[in-house]
Image (spheres, rainbow, N blue to C red):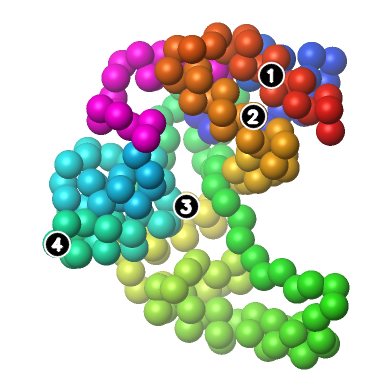
Amino acid sequence: MRSPTPKPEKTGFKNSTFVEAGKRLRDLAALEPFQPGYLATKYGEAAGMFGDGKGAMELMFELLPVMQGPSSTNGKGLPEDDIGIFAFPIVPGGKGKATDTLGGIHGFLVTKGAPPEAVDFLKFFSQEKYAKEAAASGGYIPIYKGTATAITDPLFRQIADILSQTTYHQNFLDQDLGPSVGRVINDVSVSVAEGKITPEAAAAAIQEAADQQ
């Protein structure tokens, strides 16, 4: 089950919740569910393999439907009728709810020195009617409430419906916690999956990085 990120208190990231997550990751990798050499596979390659029908599933959200075709061998990939979406399986005893979600949060950034016209444009661009146009074209899923009804693509509509019902959304940890801590999370996650370090050592490394902030 997707779990809201617990607040690191006395034990910080060495909390048993994080250690248990590491154990679950280690157990999953021990099942050898991935293709040979998966640690060296880049995202574009993985999307292409899925588009070629060489993968049963991929842990991804809205990017896969638009990436699998262009990244595939024939440039077309799988038809949408052959692609389905389902939530990450619930872990017995896990915290949080099945309706919690995890994923990136995107937006527009304006530099401090940008002219006022930049802000004016974003206010103009963010109007409901333009958000609905973006939704209808399949360019992206707007955050503007009520625009999901304009989405025509079945897969994107399903994703939008999932997001609209989320009870808690967690940004990617490597983005949420900043580059210093986030880099360590990414690195130790790979090491745990490889069996090179224990979940306890991984949690301690993350806490050490956080202490140096």
Q: CA gap, disc 3 to disc 1? A: 34 Å
Residue holding disc 2:
184
In this rendering, position of residue 190 left or right of residue 79: right
Q: Which mark is on residue 205?
A: 1
The answer to whether residue 86 is seen in the rendering is no
Provide the residue span drawn in magenta.
Answer: 21-40
Give the mark, 4 or 1, whose residue is nearer the N terminus. 4
The reply to whether the C-beta atoms of the residues labelled 2 and 3 are less than 8 Å apart is no
Judge by depth and name the residue closer to the eye, 135 or 196.
196
> Disc 4 residue type?
Asn
Residue positioned 44% across, 20% down in the render: 193
Instruction: Name the spot of residue 89 as percent of width and height, x first.
Output: 40, 30
Circle 1: element type: helix
Residue holding disc 4:
74
The reply to whether the C-beta atoms of the residues labelled 1 and 2 are less than 8 Å apart is yes
Instruction: Name the spot of residue 80 as percent of width and height, x first.
Output: 22, 60
The mark tally for this picture is 4
How many residues crowd mark 2 within 10 Å: few (<14), some (14–19), many (20+)?
many
Residue holding disc 3:
162
Residue positioned 25% across, 52% down in the render: 48
> Disc 2 residue type?
Val
